[in-house]
């Protein structure tokens, strides 16, 4: 039996400082699987892409690395990192990380019940809530639920379905707007159809995103954005950015009136 180079972590860390009191009505978002920050030029791309963003959803984010200062000393974003495993040699933790210009009123994470083969590592779902601006009152009456997810891969459909069911449990009792985004590893039709079925049951609509399928992703789109109570103003895929094996996706959203 091959000894794993990773160990389970399943922990959460809060870093940085938010700069605003509430979210909306316009919300600027960046979604990006950063490939564990391995490629040259990642830091400069990150600084450029996250400037003026209200929400930043990262997958394959890392902790205990030379980049920690970007998050610990941030004066514009609060960063919440949910780690699922640690590299035993480097001590670097990997997971999902959500940055926001507003302090999260709630946050919780959920790790997959099953592990991926070979590496024996698990995947993570991070849910955060933020107070929303209310144009008709002086107090906040609604909260935005943000779910940042990296779904399990290289497993049977039954195990993928179990993790997806687990992720959707995070939004079952939320009545307000929802942003559900991440690397969903939907590289076959069966996975995508099941995802769409769950999304429809929760009144979530997928954001149409025009992009070029990639060979490394089996010519399937893995990164998706689903919304409820939010209107899409603009979407842009940064195909000029090559510091990850995923293209960053920028979105301009607006709170819906209905």
Image (cartoon, rainbow, N blue to C red):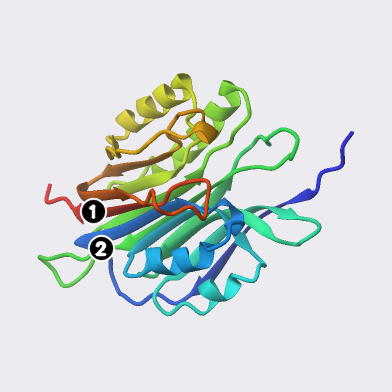
Q: Is residue 196 visible?
A: yes
Q: Earlier in the sequence, mark 2 or mark 1?
A: 2
Q: Residue 184: x and y, percent?
A: 48, 37
Q: Residue 29: x and y, percent?
A: 33, 57
Q: Nearer the viewer, residue 162 or 56?
A: 56
Q: Residue 96: x and y, percent?
A: 54, 53
For this orientation, the residue located farthest to the top is 190
Q: Residue at x 31, y 69 (%)?
A: 52
Is 157 drawn above or below residue 205 in the view shown? Answer: above
Is 91 drawn above or below residue 32 in the view shown? Answer: below
Q: Nearer the viewer, residue 162 or 149?
A: 149
Left or right: 105 as drawn, with respect to 125: left
Left or right: 69 as drawn, with respect to 54: right
Q: Nearer the viewer, residue 113 or 96?
A: 96
For disc 1, the neighbor class at 10 Å (few under 14, some 14 to 19, many from 20) is many
* Quadrant in which the N terminus is drawn: top right
For disc 2, the neighbor class at 10 Å (few under 14, some 14 to 19, many from 20) is many
Describe the element under mark 1 as helix, strand or loop. Answer: strand
Q: Residue at x 80, y 48 (%)?
A: 5
Judge depth for marks 2 and 1 and give the one in front. Answer: 1
Q: How far apart are the two marked residues, 2 and 1, measured between alpha carbons?
A: 13 Å
Q: Is residue 177 visible?
A: no
Proximity of marks 2 and 1: CB atoms separated by less than 8 Å: no
Per the rendering, the mark at residue 253 is: 1
Q: Residue at x 54, y 35 (%)?
A: 216
Q: Residue at x 36, y 51 (%)?
A: 238
Per the rendering, the mark at residue 132 is: 2
Is 93 drawn above or below residue 120 in the view shown? Answer: below
Describe the element under mark 2 as helix, strand or loop. Answer: loop
């Amino acid at each position: 039996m091959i000894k794993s180079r990773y160990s389970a972590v399943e922990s959460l860390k809060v870093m940085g400082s938010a700069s605003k009191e509430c979210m909306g009505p316009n919300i600027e978002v960046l979604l990006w699987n950063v490939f564990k920050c391995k490629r040259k030029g990642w830091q400069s791309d990150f600084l450029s892409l996250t400037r003026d963003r209200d929400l930043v959803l990262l997958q394959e984010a890392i902790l205990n690395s030379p980049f920690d200062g970007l998050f610990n000393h941030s004066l514009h974003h609060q960063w919440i990192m949910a780690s699922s495993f640690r590299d035993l040699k480097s001590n670097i933790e990997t997971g999902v990380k959500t940055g926001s210009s507003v302090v999260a009123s709630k946050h919780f994470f959920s790790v997959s019940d099953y592990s991926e083969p070979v590496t024996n590592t698990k995947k993570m779902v991070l849910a955060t809530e933020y107070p929303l601006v209310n144009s008709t009152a002086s107090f906040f009456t609604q909260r935005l639920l943000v779910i940042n997810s990296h779904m399990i891969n290289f497993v049977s459909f039954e195990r993928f379905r179990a993790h997806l069911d687990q992720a959707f449990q995070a939004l079952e009792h939320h009545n307000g707007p929802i942003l559900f985004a991440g690397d969903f590893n939907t590289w076959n039709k069966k996975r995508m159809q099941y995802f769409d079925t769950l999304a429809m049951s929760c009144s979530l609509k997928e954001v149409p995103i025009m992009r070029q399928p990639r060979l490394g992703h089996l010519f399937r789109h893995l990164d998706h954005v689903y919304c409820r109570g939010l209107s899409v103003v603009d979407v842009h895929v940064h195909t000029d950015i090559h510091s990850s094996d995923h293209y960053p996706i920028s979105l301009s959203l607006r709170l819906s009136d209905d």
